[in-house]
Amino acid sequence: MFPFNFFPFNKDMKNKLQQMKPDEIDQFIKGILGNVMPAQSESTLNSHDFVNHFRPQPSQQANSLNASAFETHDAVFVRIPIKEESHLKDLQIYHTANQLMVEHIPKRDDKHSIKLPAIVKKKGSTAKYKDGILEIKLIKSHDIQYSQIDVTEI
């Protein structure tokens, strides 16, 4: 079993944190991070850089496509501006439960991947083109199957 009495958060920690000033909390956190990551502590630790390092970065190809994805109660919509209607005949669209792939636009060898904001069903998707916008509608999947994982003590 893990020795929780050596863990830095004990009964008195709540009182200590309530009495600390924001600058003291900042120094406390930097001290802990400096112990965990000594290479980072040599340089100035910028909290914004630290947080941004762990944020998922959008793919360049999805940005070059200028697509937008949003969800409603029952569906996920992806809108892609397409200037030339002639691109539609070569366009190919595929999707998984959480990702939309668009191929052959604007160039024949281009492949784009768009992360969907919700899990979608395999069937029932539609795509419509109107006024220079390709709108793809995917039906949300509300049947999320959970699997329980038992924890055993080693």
Image (cartoon, rainbow, N blue to C red):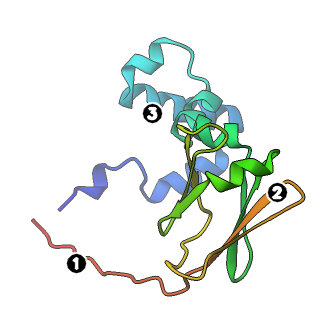
Q: Residues within 10 Å of mark 1 (few under 14, many from 20)?
A: few
Specify which label sits upstream in the sequence, 3 or 1: 3
Q: Amino acid at mark 2?
A: Ile
Instruction: Please state the horizontal and vertical placement of residue 28, each as a whole percent of the image.
Output: 54, 34
* Image quadrant containing the N terminus: bottom left
* Image quadrant containing the C terminus: bottom left
| Residue ID for mark 2 | 133
Residues at discs 3 and 1 in contact (Cβ within 8 Å): no
Q: Residue at x 22, y 78 (%)?
A: 150
Specify which label sits upstream in the sequence, 2 or 1: 2
| In the rendered image, the vertical position of residue 82 relative to residue 133, given as above or below | above
Q: Residue at x 45, y 33 (%)?
A: 32
CA distance for labels 3 and 1: 31 Å
Q: Nearer the viewer, residue 15 or 128?
A: 128
| Residue ID for mark 1 | 150
Q: Is residue 11 left or right of residue 61?
A: left
Q: Residue furthest right?
A: 131
Residues at discs 2 and 3 in contact (Cβ within 8 Å): no
Mark 2 or 1: in front is 2
CA distance for labels 2 and 1: 48 Å
Instruction: Please state the horizontal and vertical placement of residue 67, each as a whole percent of the image.
Output: 72, 50
Instruction: Please state the horizontal and vertical placement of residue 74, each as a whole percent of the image.
Output: 69, 83
- Using the image, tell me which numbered label, if any, was put on residue 32: 3
Q: Is residue 14 left or right of residue 7?
A: right
- Using the image, tell me which numbered label, if any, was put on residue 73: none
